[in-house]
C-alpha cells in the first residue's frame, strides 16, 4: 500500500513538471500582481531552473503568435510567479537565436550615461508602446543558474531591457514612468506600424491600466 502511494505521488509530480508554460500563462493588466514586489530567490534549486525554462517557453510561444514583435525578455511576475527571476534573449537582432540568459535576484548597482527616450512594449500590456526615458548604461549584479554571482555592464538596448525587467521585479511597469506624458503613447497596428494613441481615451481614462 505504501509503495502504491509513493508511485502515485511520483506519477502526479512528473505529470505536473512536464507541462510547459505557454503564452496563456502570461498575465496582463489589469492584474494587481503586476504592481507587487517579487520575492528574492533563497536557493537556486531545480524548481527555480524549471521556472526559468518555463518563462523562456512562454516568451517564445507568445512571440510565435505575434507577427511583428520579438519577445526579448520576461520577469517571473509575468507568469504570475512573484519571484525575482528575469530571462533575457541572447540576441535581440536575430529572431532565429531562441536562447536566453537567466538572471536571478537581479539588482541595478549603478545607473550611468545619459537618459534617452525610446520605444518599449511589454508582453503584459498588449499592443501599447511607449517612449520611455531610461539610462543609457547600467551595472547589474545577479545570480546565474548555478547560483554564482555575476556582474554585467550593460549599455544601449540591453541596459533598457534590464531597467524594464528589474522594474517588473519591483512591481513597476513601463507606463508608470510616462503616466503624465500624452505624447509618449503609441498603438501597434495590424501592419506593424506604431501610431499615436488618443491619450485621454485610451490611456488616462483606461482604468484597466491604472487599477
Ligand atoms: Zn514588461
Image: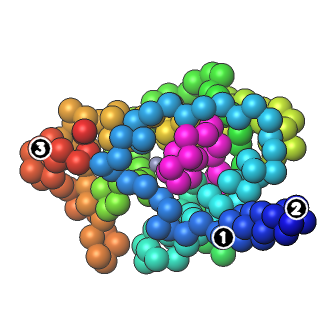
- The residue tagged with tag 2: helix, strand or loop? helix
In the rendered image, the quadrant that contains the N terminus is bottom right
Q: Which residues are magenta?
A: 74-89
Residue 50 visible somewhere in the drawing: yes
- Residue at the extreme top of the image, as rendered: 110
* Lower position in the chain sequence, tag 3 or tag 2: 2
Is 75 included in the stretch rendered in magenta?
Answer: yes
Q: Position of residue 6 (x, y in %)?
A: 85, 62
State left or right for residue 59 relative to residue 144: left
Q: Which residue is mark 2?
A: 2
* Label 2 packing within 10 angstroms: few (<14), some (14-19), many (20+): few
Q: Position of residue 60 (x, y in %)?
A: 59, 69
* Lower position in the chain sequence, tag 1 or tag 2: 2
Give the number of the disc on residue 205.
3
- Residue at the extreme front of the image, as rendered: 1
How far apart are the two marked residues, 3 and 1, measured between alpha carbons? 39 Å
Occupied quadrant, residue 51 = bottom right
Q: Which residue is mark 1?
A: 19
Q: Which of the two marks, 3 or 1, is nearer to us in this view?
A: 1
Q: Residue at x 62, y 37 (%)?
A: 84
Q: Position of residue 188 (x, y in %)?
A: 30, 65
| Residue nearest the observer in this picture, 200 or 91 | 200
In the rendered image, the quadrant that contains the C terminus is top left
209 up-or-down from 167: above or below = below
Q: Which of the two marks, 3 or 2, is nearer to us in this view?
A: 2
Q: Is mark 1 within 8 Å of ligand 1?
A: no
Q: Which of the two marks, 1 or 2, is nearer to us in this view?
A: 2
Label count reads 3
- The residue tagged with tag 3: helix, strand or loop? loop
Q: Residue at x 35, y 47 (%)?
A: 31
Is 25 included in the stretch rendered in magenta?
Answer: no
Amino acid at each position: 500500500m505504501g509503495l502504491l502511494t509513493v508511485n502515485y505521488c511520483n506519477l502526479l509530480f512528473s505529470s505536473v513538471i512536464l507541462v510547459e508554460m505557454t503564452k496563456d500563462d502570461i498575465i496582463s493588466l489589469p492584474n494587481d500582481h503586476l504592481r507587487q514586489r517579487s520575492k528574492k530567490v533563497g536557493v537556486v534549486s531545480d524548481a527555480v531552473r524549471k521556472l526559468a525554462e518555463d518563462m523562456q517557453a512562454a516568451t517564445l510561444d507568445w512571440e510565435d503568435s505575434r507577427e511583428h514583435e520579438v519577445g526579448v525578455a520576461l520577469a517571473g511576475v509575468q507568469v504570475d510567479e512573484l519571484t525575482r527571476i528575469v530571462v533575457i534573449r541572447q540576441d535581440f537582432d536575430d529572431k532565429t537565436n531562441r536562447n536566453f540568459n537567466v538572471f536571478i535576484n537581479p539588482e541595478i548597482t549603478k545607473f550611468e550615461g545619459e537618459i534617452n527616450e525610446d520605444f518599449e512594449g511589454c508582453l503584459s500590456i498588449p499592443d501599447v508602446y511607449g517612449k520611455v526615458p531610461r539610462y543609457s548604461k547600467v551595472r547589474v549584479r545577479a545570480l546565474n543558474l548555478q547560483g554564482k554571482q555575476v556582474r554585467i555592464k550593460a549599455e544601449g538596448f540591453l541596459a533598457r531591457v534590464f531597467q524594464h525587467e528589474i522594474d517588473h521585479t519591483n512591481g513597476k511597469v513601463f507606463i508608470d514612468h510616462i503616466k503624465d506624458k500624452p505624447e509618449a503613447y503609441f498603438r501597434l497596428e495590424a501592419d506593424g506600424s506604431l501610431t499615436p494613441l488618443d491619450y485621454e481615451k485610451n490611456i488616462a481614462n483606461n482604468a484597466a491600466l491604472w487599477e
